[in-house]
Image (spheres, coloured by chain):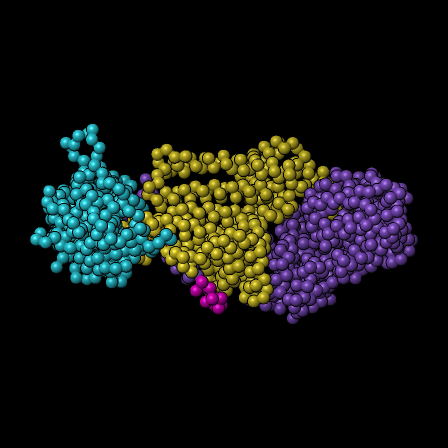
Chain colours: A cyan, B yellow, C purple
């Protein structure tokens, strides 16, 4: 059984203008020890999915439908208190903005210690030592001194490492990383990704990596799930996804990646059209109005997410999936 | 940090100098003749002139100013025209009453204001939220003297459960000590007097606290609302930290930064003498002293009290800045600071 | 940074604000208070000495007196107000004393006295066996010292009543010398004879006798260290809070011995608070009750003491300039105002319409004096004839002892009457101290003012119209006949001849109208029904040794 299974998740936000379904049918699973990337553009609902899993949705958002099973337990049915025991302990999460994600008035060592002491009854001294050790593990030099620093005394990359240390100090089985490198320079990006990768190996933990950057996906992820308009549209092992995408949207995404060898005089490829307004969710496939291969059926009927026959761990939400080019 | 404080203190001296000068000029140029107050019904033009001459008030303004400043530099604040006691003595005698009242008021305002503000922020759009809005509006709009008299009439006049005026029953008055009756009576073990002093403290400090409470509540609420939305609060929840602790340890701790400033400045304002409250409750503090002195055109006392108030404000501002730096590690004064 | 000590153990910082700590602390105090209220005190450091337990409100041996302001001083030479004399009157005594119900004087510290034929020599025979509170003897030396320090050249500018009581060199009046032929005889020699002098000696301001050894010890200033011969001794003064007096065990006069053990004076400036303090039992007696609060006092279940005042509420008319220079114009102003109706409307039962400048109880010969009657038609006709269409009135804005309705209200009533008579009245109203400044420099035709008597002598009232100082003689009335009468009056001994002089003066005022007299107002005090024997003397303030509680 998979470590994390998300089935048909729907998350709603009632607003004055109407109900917004930020997540409108998401299904995927993460096995122990694997890195699953959730890919999609801004507004596709990937972050909301992560927050839904963690139970961190801000009022008035709520899970309207679907199930989230972690380690055999239905997370959406847990009480606040039970969920607090899961967070930080069994599932860790890091966020996109390391500059603002740490509390500015406490030392970083203390913040890591807090993560420990929330879940484990050990002495403060011991907790501090573990925190320092964790800082060393995530690659912070002179961790004994750095642990006494305040966040504003550290660079973005260092802070993200601290976040990782904090998220992993209790050895969770799953790490959810929501765009962990988006706000960092390219070189630091590489280091952080590398760190996540190595930690996954060292701790045998699963990673749910949320990103819009296909480059990141190709670097570290084992499998990937593509989301569009709050729905998962394709799920496949990474190599397969890149080499043999089945969904027109996936293809479009791949084509949009600029390549070094592209002729710079040509315009960059962009998928025609724009992402539809979440309030105006139509009946059919959300990608229909931009899909080069759309048929009438696509516009009126929503395709279900179905496994791709013969290819094991792949699924596709399309009436007319593309064949291999 | 020490250099910063020193610099601020030096600037403070300039500010105080300005304050003293302005009050000096205003009192002498615009207020009425102290001779009439002092000499009463039989004040003739002659006797008033003679009185003025004996106090040097017939000299040119600049000369009076210079001799006042000279006195100040020697620590001499002069003597009251009205009862001839030393201004410094009067002020120091009355100041503890104001301090005690101000501290009690700010405690009430702080505790209830923060609690209500937090409740309002954490339970948005609930009863607490609306209640806090009402409290804030009423607190800032309600005139102090109206509230004070209302409370007196209700609790003392009708219900007879609390005393109406004064700090303590005259027969229970502590002798010597710090001048803080609540403290003195406790320290000497006189519990009857302590209870009596506490009973006398309730109405005036509640009256005085209302305005500050309203402001602190509002400030806390909006500050909390901001911090609860911050990323680091989300991080804390993602760590599995208990909800209560996230609210206090993470959100409130940061929300308190601007609120601390507000509390400090409000305290400074209360220490400056809550004139209306002290008059209504016959509270013998520097606020009442100032009011009486102004009515009697008692220049030296007015100048002395205003100088004290200026000192309090200036010091309070410095203290607030220092405390802020203490609370927020991002703030540093050691480089260039102005 | 020095302040940033690293917490090596990594404990969460004790510097962090803990809201919970505050809440706990306040909770603790709130919980402790009711407990504390029930605990009996022991071994306390209190102002009250052993023997008086319990709070002043409940104790039948303690009288609590609430007044609106604090004394400026407890040295009789330095005071000029009722707030101060309320207190000093219990501590000090005078050679002679006013009766409670008239302005006549009786011997007090002096057993008897003689006045020479020419009115220049006063011989007092002092009572023996009287002691000051510090144990020293009351004798002629004490009298001499008490008065001498207020005579020129010892007199200072801070002695407001010294020149009134004892004269001044400029005016050629007052005390020339004081001799002590023996320990219990004092002889005053005056510069000029002065009938009011004996009354001055009875005044509670300036005239009370103080202890010479106290003068020595406290450098001639008894502001905070009063030592007298009176029924109460001084215990403590907590500034802006209270003054506590104790009964004088060794008081010389058994008939007038104090009936309470302690008096506490409390200072509550806000009237509503003072009334509540009375209603709440925190004060047994309060002064400074005015018409509007009298009802509140009664509805709180307390009593009102009403005493005829020694005052006059009046409006001066400017005789030295402007339209009021003409006596006919002034008469017209008087005729235009229906004083009876005005007094009834503004003051109700709390004032008596004035038919004379002095209150009739003080000057019984005034009872038949008549002012010009209300005659609006005659007034209007006169104004028209004289071409007077506009007048200006200066007034104070607040309430005064003699005018509890307030200066503004009085002015507006008059404005109404004058308007009916065809005259537009412009009112300039200022707060009290500004009004004092302005009334000698501004141009005005009418000015609201009042006078509170000092010594119960007719000269004290009537010489207002002969004084040369414009802040005293606001109307600037300068009539030689009048002035001559006034001068004669001070020299004439008490009796029918003297009475007649002042009757003439009153008639002249009624005829020449330098002022429109309005009313004499009553003084109101509030007290609890357990208080017995409270009487406010007609002249001066309370003798609290007569008061008992319970």
Task: Decide if residue C21 is in sight here.
Answer: no
In the orientation shown, which residue stands out farthest toward the bottom? C550
Q: Is residue A280 left or right of residue C82?
A: left
Question: Is residue A4 shown left or right of residue B16?
Answer: left
Horizontal and vertical percent position of residue A170:
19, 54
**In the image, is residue C112 part of the stretch drawn in magenta?**
no
As drawn, B258 above or below A52: above
Q: Position of residue A96 (x, y in %)?
A: 25, 45
Viewer-nearest residue: B320 or A314: A314
Extreme top residue here? A265
Residues in magenta, as a range: C30-46
Lateral position of residue C334 relative to residue A295, left or right: right
The tally of labels here is 0
Given the current orientation, which residue lies at the most extreme front position? A296
Residue at position x 56%, y 53% from top?
Answer: B143
C89 vs C30, nearest the viewer: C30
* Residue A230 visible in the picture: yes
Q: Position of residue A132 (x, y in %)?
A: 19, 47
Residue at the spot 82% in from the left edge and 59% down from the top edge: C361
Near-viewer residue (C139 or C43): C43
Image quadrant in which the C terminus of chain A is located: top left
Q: Is residue C42 shown in magenta?
A: yes
Position in image of residue C105 (x %, y %): 80, 58
Residue drawn at 59 percent across, 64 percent down: B157
Q: Residue at x 29, y 52 (%)?
A: A281
Q: Give the camera-side residue of C305 and B172.
A: C305
Check the picture and name the quadrant holding the N terminus of chain A. Answer: bottom left
């Amino acid at each position: 059984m998979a470590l994390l299974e998300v089935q048909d998740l729907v998350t709603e936000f009632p607003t004055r203008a109407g109900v917004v379904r930020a997540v409108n049918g998401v299904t995927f699973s993460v096995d122990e020890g694997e890195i699953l990337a959730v890919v999609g553009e801004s507004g596709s609902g990937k972050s909301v999915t992560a927050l839904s899993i963690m139970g961190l949705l801000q009022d008035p958002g709520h899970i309207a439908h679907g199930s989230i099973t972690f380690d055999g337990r239905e997370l959406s049915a847990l009480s606040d208190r039970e969920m607090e025991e899961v967070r930080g302990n069994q599932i860790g999460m890091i966020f996109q903005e390391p500059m603002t994600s740490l509390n500015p008035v406490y030392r970083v060592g203390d913040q890591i210690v807090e993560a420990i002491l929330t879940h484990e009854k050990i002495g403060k001294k011991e907790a501090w030592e573990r925190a320092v050790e964790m800082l060393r593990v995530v690659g912070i030099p002179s961790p004994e001194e750095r642990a006494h620093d305040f966040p504003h005394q550290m660079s973005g990359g260092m802070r993200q490492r601290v976040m990782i240390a904090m998220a992993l100090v209790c050895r969770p089985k799953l790490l959810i990383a929501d765009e962990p490198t988006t706000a960092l320079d390219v070189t630091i990006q590489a280091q952080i990704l590398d760190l996540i990768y190595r930690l996954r190996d060292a701790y045998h933990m699963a990673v749910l990596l949320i990103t819009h950057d296909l480059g990141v996906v190709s670097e570290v992820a084992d499998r990937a799930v593509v989301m569009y308009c709050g729905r998962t549209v394709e799920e496949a092992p990474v190599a397969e996804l890149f080499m043999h995408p089945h969904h027109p949207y996936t293809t479009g995404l791949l084509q949009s990646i600029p390549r070094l060898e592209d002729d710079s005089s040509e315009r960059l490829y962009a998928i025609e059209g724009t992402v539809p307004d979440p309030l105006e969710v139509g009946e059919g496939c959300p990608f229909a109005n931009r899909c080069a291969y759309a048929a009438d059926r696509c516009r009126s009927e929503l395709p279900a997410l179905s496994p791709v026959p013969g290819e094991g761990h792949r699924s596709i939400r399309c009436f007319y999936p593309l064949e291999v080019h | 940090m020490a250099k910063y404080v020193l610099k601020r203190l030096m600037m403070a001296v300039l500010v105080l100098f300005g304050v003293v000068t302005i009050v000096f000029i205003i009192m002498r140029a615009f207020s009425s003749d102290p001779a009439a107050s002092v000499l009463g019904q039989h004040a003739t033009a002659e006797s008033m002139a003679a009185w003025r001459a004996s106090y040097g008030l017939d000299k040119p303004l600049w000369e009076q100013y210079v001799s006042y400043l000279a006195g100040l530099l020697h620590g001499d604040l002069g003597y009251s025209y009205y009862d001839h006691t030393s201004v410094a003595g009067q002020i120091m005698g009355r100041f503890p009453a104001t301090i005690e009242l101000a501290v009690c008021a700010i405690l009430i305002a702080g505790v209830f204001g923060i609690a209500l503000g937090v409740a309002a922020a954490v339970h948005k759009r609930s009863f607490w939220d609306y209640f806090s809005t009402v409290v804030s509006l009423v607190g800032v709009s309600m005139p102090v003297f109206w509230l004070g008299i209302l409370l007196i009439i209700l609790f003392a006049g009708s219900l007879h459960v609390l005393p109406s005026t004064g700090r303590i029953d005259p027969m229970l008055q502590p002798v010597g000590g710090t001048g803080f009756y609540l403290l003195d009576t406790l320290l000497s073990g006189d519990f009857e007097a302590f209870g009596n002093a506490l009973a006398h403290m309730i109405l005036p400090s509640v009256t005085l606290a209302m305005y500050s409470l309203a402001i602190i509540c509002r400030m806390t609420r909006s500050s909390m609302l901001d911090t609860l939305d911050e990323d680091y609060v989300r991080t804390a929840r993602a760590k599995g930290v208990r909800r209560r602790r996230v609210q206090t340890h993470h959100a409130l701790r940061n929300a308190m930064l601007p609120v601390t400033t507000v509390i400090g400045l409000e305290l400074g304002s209360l220490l400056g003498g809550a004139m209306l409250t002290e008059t209504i409750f016959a509270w013998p503090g520097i606020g009442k002293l100032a009011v009486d002195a102004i009515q009697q055109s008692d220049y030296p006392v007015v100048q002395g009290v205003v100088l004290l108030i200026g000192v309090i404000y200036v010091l309070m501002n410095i203290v607030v800045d220092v405390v802020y730096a203490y609370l927020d590690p991002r703030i540093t004064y050691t480089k260039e600071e102005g | 940074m020095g302040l940033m000590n690293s917490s090596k153990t990594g404990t969460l910082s004790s510097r962090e604000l803990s809201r919970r700590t505050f809440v706990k602390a306040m909770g603790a105090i709130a919980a402790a208070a009711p407990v504390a209220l029930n605990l009996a005190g022991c071994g306390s450091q209190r102002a009250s000495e052993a023997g008086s337990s319990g709070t002043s409100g409940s104790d039948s041996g303690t009288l609590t007196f609430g007044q609106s302001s604090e004394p400026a001083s407890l040295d009789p030479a330095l005071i000029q107000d009722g707030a101060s004399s309320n207190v000093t009157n219990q501590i000090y005594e005078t050679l002679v004393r006013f009766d409670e119900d008239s302005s006549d004087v009786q011997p007090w510290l002096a057993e008897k006295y003689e006045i020479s034929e020419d009115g220049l020599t006063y011989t007092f025979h002092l009572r023996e066996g009287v002691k000051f509170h510090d144990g020293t003897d009351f004798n002629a030396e004490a009298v001499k010292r008490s008065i001498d320090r207020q005579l020129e050249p010892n007199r200072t500018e801070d002695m407001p009543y010294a020149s009134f009581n004892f004269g001044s060199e400029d005016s050629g009046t007052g005390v020339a010398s004081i001799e002590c032929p023996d320990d219990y005889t004092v002889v005053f020699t005056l510069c000029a004879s002065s009938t009011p002098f004996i009354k001055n000696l009875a005044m509670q301001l300036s005239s009370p006798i103080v202890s010479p050894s106290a003068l020595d010890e406290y450098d001639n200033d008894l502001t905070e260290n009063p030592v007298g011969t009176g029924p109460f001794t001084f215990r403590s003064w907590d500034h802006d809070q209270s003054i506590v007096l104790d009964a004088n065990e060794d008081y010389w006069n058994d008939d007038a011995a104090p009936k309470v053990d302690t008096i506490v004076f409390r200072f509550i400036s806000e009237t509503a608070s003072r009334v509540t303090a009375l209603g709440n039992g925190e004060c047994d007696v309060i002064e400074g009750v005015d018409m509007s609060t009298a009802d509140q006092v009664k509805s709180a279940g307390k009593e009102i003491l009403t005493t005829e005042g020694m005052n006059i509420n009046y409006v001066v008319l400017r005789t030295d300039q402007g339209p009021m220079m003409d006596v006919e114009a002034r008469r017209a102003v008087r005729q235009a105002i229906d004083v009876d109706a005005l007094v009834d409307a503004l003051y109700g039962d709390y004032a008596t319409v004035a038919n004379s400048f002095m209150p009739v109880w003080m000057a019984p010969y005034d009872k038949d004096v008549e002012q010009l009657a209300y005659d609006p038609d005659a007034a209007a006709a006169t104004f028209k004839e004289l071409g007077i269409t506009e007048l200006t009135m200066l007034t104070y804005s607040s309430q005064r002892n003699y005018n509890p309705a307030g200066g503004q209200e009085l002015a507006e009533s008059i404005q109404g009457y004058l308007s009916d008579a065809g005259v537009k009245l412009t009112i300039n109203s200022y707060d009290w101290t500004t009004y004092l400044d302005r009334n000698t420099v501004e141009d005005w035709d009418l000015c609201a003012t009042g006078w509170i008597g000092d010594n119960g002598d007719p000269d004290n009232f009537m010489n207002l119209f002969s004084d040369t100082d414009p802040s005293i003689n606001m109307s600037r009335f300068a009539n030689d006949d009048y002035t001559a009468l006034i001068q004669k009056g001070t020299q004439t001994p008490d009796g029918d001849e003297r009475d007649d002089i002042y009757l003439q003066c009153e008639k002249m005022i009624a005829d020449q109208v330098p002022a429109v007299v309005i009313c004499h107002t009553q003084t109101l005090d509030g007290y609890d029904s357990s208080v017995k024997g409270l009487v406010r003397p007609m002249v001066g303030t309370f003798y609290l040794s007569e008061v008992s509680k319970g």
